[in-house]
Structures are given as C-alpha cells and as structure tokens.
Image (cartoon, helix red, strand yellow):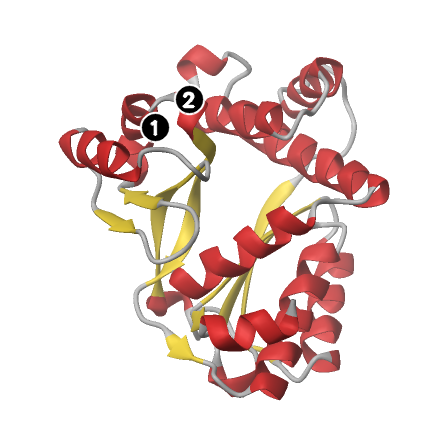
Amino acid sequence: MSGHSKWASIKHKKGATDAKRGKVFTKMAAEIAVAAQSGADPAMNFKLRLAIQKAKSANVPAGNIERAIAKGSGQAGGAKLEELLYEGYGPAGVAIMVKALSDNHNRTGPDVKSTFTKHGGNLGSQGSVAYMFEQKGVIVCKPNIDNDSAELVAIDAGADDIDDSGDQLVVLTSPGKLEAVRDAIGENNVESAEVQQTPSQSVVVDDEAKAKTLLNLIDSLEDLDDVVEVTGNFDIPESVLSKLQ
C-alpha cells in the first residue's frame, strides 16, 4: 500500500497536462457509466455516488457526468461497458492488478498484455495474483491538514488502518464504511476517496533500474485508454524514489 500511495502522490504533485486531463475525464465518465448500470439515482446507488464524487474532485464538468449517467443507465444508447480485471507480474516479482472498463475485450486484453511484455512484465492467468489483494476503501487526505485530528475521527468512524508514512495521510476502511469515514474526516480535508484493490503484502524494490522499469510499466498501463486503475504490491524506498523524480 505504501509504495503505491507514494507513487500516486508523486504523480499528483507533478500535475497533469491538458491531454492527460482529457483522458482522465474520459476514464471517469466510463466509471460513472458502469456504476449507473445498477441505477441512475446516486442516492440509491453507492457505487455511482462514489464515482460522481471522484469525478467532481477532478473537476469533471457536470455535463460530462450527466451524459455518462444517461449512457450507463441506457437512456442514451451506445455500446455497454463491462468491467475487466487483469493480473500479472512486473519487474522484481511485483504483483499487479489492472482494472479496465471496455466495450471490446478483444481490444483491451491484447493492449494490456503487450504493455506488460514491453516493460519487463508478464500477464498472468485469472487468480494468479488476486489472492494477494483485497478490496478496501482508500482515503487520501490533503497535505498540511491536522493529521492527528484526522486519525482520531477516522478511527472513531470505523477506519481499519492508517498510513502516515508519506506526505499525505492515507486511511483504509472496509468498502462499506468508506463514505462514513470520509464524511467524518471532512470533505475539505479529503483529496480522494474510492474503493481499490489493495495489497495484503508488499515487495520492496530498492534497485533503481528495476524501480524505474516498474514505474514505467505502471505509467504505461494507466495510460491505456480502457484502463482505470492499476495497483501493485510494491514498496519503493524514498531514497530510490527521489532519484527517479
């Protein structure tokens, strides 16, 4: 968890180019559309509510959100998206989970496989690494907040674990308690809150060359049009990360 959250924090600090931002909008719209397949009313659909909140935090325009809901709920027609999960290994034996939303798995699967191969990894079979991960609510708090207070209210609200090793506080919850814990911390103190596949064990990658190849693999997977989430069980020491920034 710590390695993945460190890298996510680094990418956030780097910021996004206009092209990247446009791609983020498209991916978040896809997440909303898939969530809306279970119902177009956010008040009655927890997954849709989270997807909308995630999109709003990234400044996705309201019109984009409304169109995505309409598409997912069948009001706007078009091809139906489905959630696909891929499992594989990266450099240094790091286990990687890839979540994609696609209307054509014959396109998405080969794209994911070739990206693994190109960057020193390999795509595994179903179940090959999934046992090393579990679904958790992941709340990344904004920097420069009162971490001690945030930790206390998060624990009182039912948080499972807290990672304060990086620049930003990361709170882990069961998926069902994510919303309650986020609300307890306070919306103004939260940068992101979503359900993710999180590793139950980690692999330390302290070789600079392997770390660089691994991060290139993660970045390339995330850059694929259909991929919306990539999680690895790596932990790269700060001393190595600082050289790669």
Q: Which residue, given by chain and number where applicable, does mark 1 sit on?
A: 182
Q: Along the horizontal axis of the image, is 158 left or right of 219?
A: left
Q: Amino acid at mark 1?
A: Arg
Dot 1 falls on a residue whose secondary structure is helix
Task: Say which quadrant the N terminus sits in.
Answer: bottom left
Report if residue 37 is visible in the image.
Answer: no
Residue 51, image x and y in percent? 54, 29
Residue 71, image x and y in percent? 71, 22
Camera-side residue of 183 and 106: 183
Q: Along the horizontal axis of the image, is 30 left or right of 94?
A: right
Report if residue 185 is visible in the image.
Answer: yes
The tally of labels here is 2
Residue at figure coordinates x 69%, y 23% from the top left = 68
Residue 178, image x and y in percent? 32, 33
Q: Amino acid at mark 2?
A: Glu
Seen as rendered, the residue at the extreme right is 19
Q: Quadrant of residue 158?
A: top left
Q: Quadrant of residue 193?
A: top left
Q: Is residue 137 above or below residue 153?
A: below
Residue at figure coordinates x 36%, y 73% from the top left = 202
Are dots 1 and 2 in contact, CB under 8 Å? yes
Residue 39, image x and y in percent? 51, 18
Q: CA distance from mark 1 to mark 2?
A: 7 Å
Which of the two discs, 1 and 2, labels the residue nearer the N terminus?
Answer: 1
Residue at figure coordinates x 41%, y 80% from the top left = 204
Task: Say which quadrant the C terminus sits in.
Answer: bottom right
Dot 2 falls on a residue whose secondary structure is helix
Q: Which residue, given by chain and number where applicable, does mark 2 sit on?
A: 187
Q: Which mark is residue 111?
A: none
Query: For mark 2, does the 10 Å Cα neighbourhood hold few (<14), some (14 to 19), or many (20 or more) residues?
Result: few
